[in-house]
Amino acid sequence: MADFDYDVLVIGAGPGGYVAAIRAAQLGLKTACAESRETLGGTCLNVGCIPSKALLHASELYEEAAGGALAKLGVKIDKMSLDLDTMQGQRKDAVNGLTGGIEFLFKKNKVTWLKGLASFTGANTVEVAGEKVTAKNIVIATGSSVTPLPGVEVDNKKGLIVDSTGALELDKVPDHLVVIGGGVIGLELGSVWRRLGAKVTVVEFLDQILPGMDGEVRKEANKIFKKQGFDYKLGTKVTGAKVKGKHVELTVEPAAGGDAATIEADCVLVSIGRRPNTEGLGLDKIGLDLNGRGQIETDHDFATRVPGVWAIGDVIPGPMLAHKAEDEGIAVAENIAGLTGIVNHDVIPSVVYTSPEIAGVGLTEEAAKERGAVKVGKFPMLANSRAKTNHEPDGFVKVIADAETDRVLGVWIIASVAGTMIAQAAQAMEFGASSEDIAYTCHAHPTHSEAIKEAAMAVTGKPIHM
Ligand code: FAD
Ligand code: NAD
């Protein structure tokens, strides 16, 4: 240790990096974390998970009030209006509170924050804001940024063509928002502005929204969002954008080829995916190559090919999710400390925080069938007493189990609180549960979660309330 400034230096203070740094310090390692942003917390806390959920929550309440859903429950509001400044203010408060919280946790755990951009200058050495820092172990947790779309130039300041960061900060509700990419960001942020009054058109290259999710879930989600007012142009690609005064003219073509058409918008959101942040890191100085997708490859312990250099989070392969990055942060710190840190990448839940929410864990039905025979149990939320009472009829739970062993391979949910419900499915799968285990677990009544029990019962054809 005497030869190095730190036992562990983490580059990037997102959910991967800040968690790795705190765990390393908790394990008695002298730890620093380099972060170039003004505040800690990375994409997730500053411009991702947290601000988007602040707007999703507030806009959902607005729509319930404005759309008459509250009035139907006897909650009459005579005069209501949108105060977007206040809504945006509470988004900023949520971000400030949580990013400040990480700063507090760094102090509490004695993690040193090195402010500035870090770049390797050699093995075990990085430069941060002109200062040379050495560490026995260096963890790359630099995250990801928006994938650019050639011909559609993002300018968040003008607010006409924006990425997710710009779409969180709009100071007025667009009349017509065109979302390029029918993935998670497009549907979440599209929902925010649709609820607040925008017409929203989603242009998606593939023939269905939400790639990577279970096929039936994608189809049902498409139907639900259409009912809410989303307009889709599926199987369509954007080939260019022209800013004309306060409008944008987008040129689109069928993905399979065909005649071009134009769409007029007063705001365009580019949300076609994210790519790993590796530029300027000086990886060439330590001989660390990227794979074909620009990611850093690691082994099961999150070690790269270069001794003493580790990597976690969005910059390595796997789903770009905050909780995946956090779990990898804990595991890498434990591995550095000589313990055994493991992440089970087969059981990482994903949630789309629309209304209703969409969640899944494990294999889709399509992927499970490719591996062998499966049994599938489904239960509609319409038949769940709590969802019905709360006027939340949309969605279903689907449990996919191995036909021979009954082991649960995947669970997919569309329900108002699917994001909360999916945790029990992940835990059951982590413990190797069978569908019978879930079916015979007592679930509190009346809860949305009873739909998971009933879907598990349906695997053997014996749900009660259907
Ligand atoms: P990041 O959070 O990207 O953090 C990396 C940090 O490293 C950044 O702060 C960056 O400034 C810093 N950095 C980069 N290079 C350097 C350098 N050379 N020197 C110093 N610092 C550097 N995921 C979910 O699970 N749930 C959600 O609800 C969700 N919502 C999202 C909404 C939006 C709009 C977006 C954009 C993303 C969302 N995500 C969500 C994804 C989630 O934000 C990421 O998966 C997560 O932040 C990845 O964590 P990370 O630690 O790998 O990287
Ligand atoms: P995504 O990968 O979810 O969706 C991108 C979509 O754009 C895909 O459907 C893709 O087919 C489409 N696309 C790609 N190129 C296109 C083109 N030229 N024209 C039209 N469509 C095109 O990506 P995203 O929505 O940008 O989100 C990025 C990442 O952020 C995701 O990996 C996601 O995991 C993460 N995220 C997670 C959450 C959450 O967990 N709730 C929320 C937001 C973001």
Image (cartoon, rainbow, N blue to C red):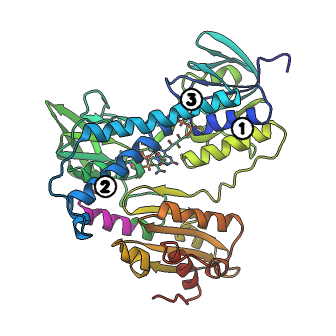
Helix, strand or loop at mark 2: helix
Picture coordinates of residue 278 (x, y %)? 56, 29
Query: Taking 324 as reference, is 383 above or below it?
Result: below
* Occupied quadrant, residue 391: bottom left
Judge from the rendering whether residue 186 lies leftward or rightward of residue 29; answer left or right: left
Q: Is residue 267 visible?
A: yes
Write the start and end of the magenta stretch as one range. Answer: 219-233
- Which residue in the protein does label 2 denote? 61
1 or 3: tag closer to the N-terminus: 1
In terms of sequence position, does the residue under pointer 1 or pointer 2 come before the other?
1
Locate the N terminus by quadrant. top right
The percent position of residue 458, horizontal first and vertical second, equals 54, 84
Q: Is residue 372 left or right of residue 255?
A: right
Residue 218 percent location from the top left of the image: 41, 65
Q: Is residue 170 left or right of residue 212?
A: left
> Three-letter amino acid code at disc 1?
Arg
| Residue 278, numbered label | 3
| Residue 8 falls left or right of residue 276 | right
Mark 3 C-beta to ligand 1 under 8 Å: no
Q: Residues within 10 Å of mark 2 (few under 14, many from 20)?
A: some
Quadrant where the image shows the C terminus: bottom left
Tag of residue 23: 1
Q: Secondary structure at mark 1?
A: helix
* Vertical relation: 6 (above or below) 221: above
Residue found 45% across the figure and 41% down from its top: 48
Q: Residues within 10 Å of mark 1 (few under 14, many from 20)?
A: many
Which secondary structure is most common in the magenta stretch? helix
